Image (spheres, rainbow, N blue to C red):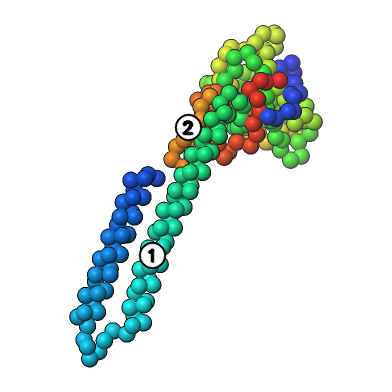
Amino acid sequence: METSSVSPANTTSASSGGSEASESAVISSDFETFLKMLTTQMQNQDPLNPVDSADYATQLATFSSVEQQVQTNDILRELTGKLTGSAFQSMANWIGKEALAEAPVYYAGQAIVLRPEYSTGADRATLVVSDSNGTEVQQLELDMSQPLVAWTGIDENGQPLPAGTYSFEVASHSGGTEIGRQAAKAYNPIVEVRQDGDIVKLTLSDGTEVDATDITALRSGVSS
């Protein structure tokens, strides 16, 4: 079994304005229409059996409540837009850094840092490396005492593997039997930050897009 291509790693981590305007205009228009209808109702009521003033108050309170709710929604939408825009601008400097994510990574000769997780009860584990076609190219022993490991991409002959996209899994073993296998999170270079509605998306080295809120760690773009 190959062991030379993985080693302990350095643990240092590094809606639209037109729609809102339209809704406001509709509310304003509806309120004026409501007042006209209420005035007409008062002018044409039976003088011998007038409408109870409490009914008028109830109608006004109901419409006012609806109007306030719509205005509150407009304020919340505007606030959300501002917060999202601010997050997008602040994340622009993430480009060039490495985000920890469950996604394939583009390898071009530079070590790739991973944070493996193991199944409960495992007494040993191996790193399974596959190429872009899903073909297994390596299976390397892992030191379970190390929180981070670096995959150097070196084959059994000491030569670097071809540049390309590689994915990683951790196979956990107990008593010589494999008891679980799961994707390994890897530090993946960020090449683009994109805003998609209220969500900020990050494009990683292999073209995978992930939600910025799914990123659990960030480090400088220099692998160990």
Amino acid type of the residue that numbered disc 2 sits on in the rendered structure:
Arg
Q: Nearer the viewer, mark 1 or mark 2?
A: 1
Which residue is under mark 1? 66
Which type of secondary structure does the marked residue at label 2 adopt? strand
Amino acid type of the residue that numbered disc 1 sits on in the rendered structure:
Val
Identify which residue is drawn at 26% across, 86% down.
50
Of residues 26 and 132, the one nearer the viewer is 26
Identify which residue is drawn at 55% across, 34% down.
90
Which residue is under mark 2? 194
Which type of secondary structure does the marked residue at label 1 adopt? helix
Judge whether 79 appears above or below 115 on screen: below
Distance from disc 1 to disc 2, alpha carbons, whole Å, reads: 36 Å
What is the x, y in percent for residue 224?
A: 71, 20
Residue 16: quadrant of the picture: top left
Identify the image quadrant of the N terminus. top right
Left or right of 173 in this view: 56? left
Residue 8: quadrant of the picture: top right
What is the x, y in percent for residue 31?
A: 30, 64
Identify which residue is drawn at 60% across, 32% down.
101
Image mark count: 2
What is the x, y in percent for residue 131?
A: 57, 20
Whether residue 210 appears in this view of the structure is no
Could you classify mark 2 by the number of other residues whose Cα lies within 10 Å: few (under 14), some (14-19), or many (20 or more)?
A: some
Identify which residue is drawn at 53% across, 30% down.
92
**Marks 1 and 2 in Cβ contact (< 8 Å):** no
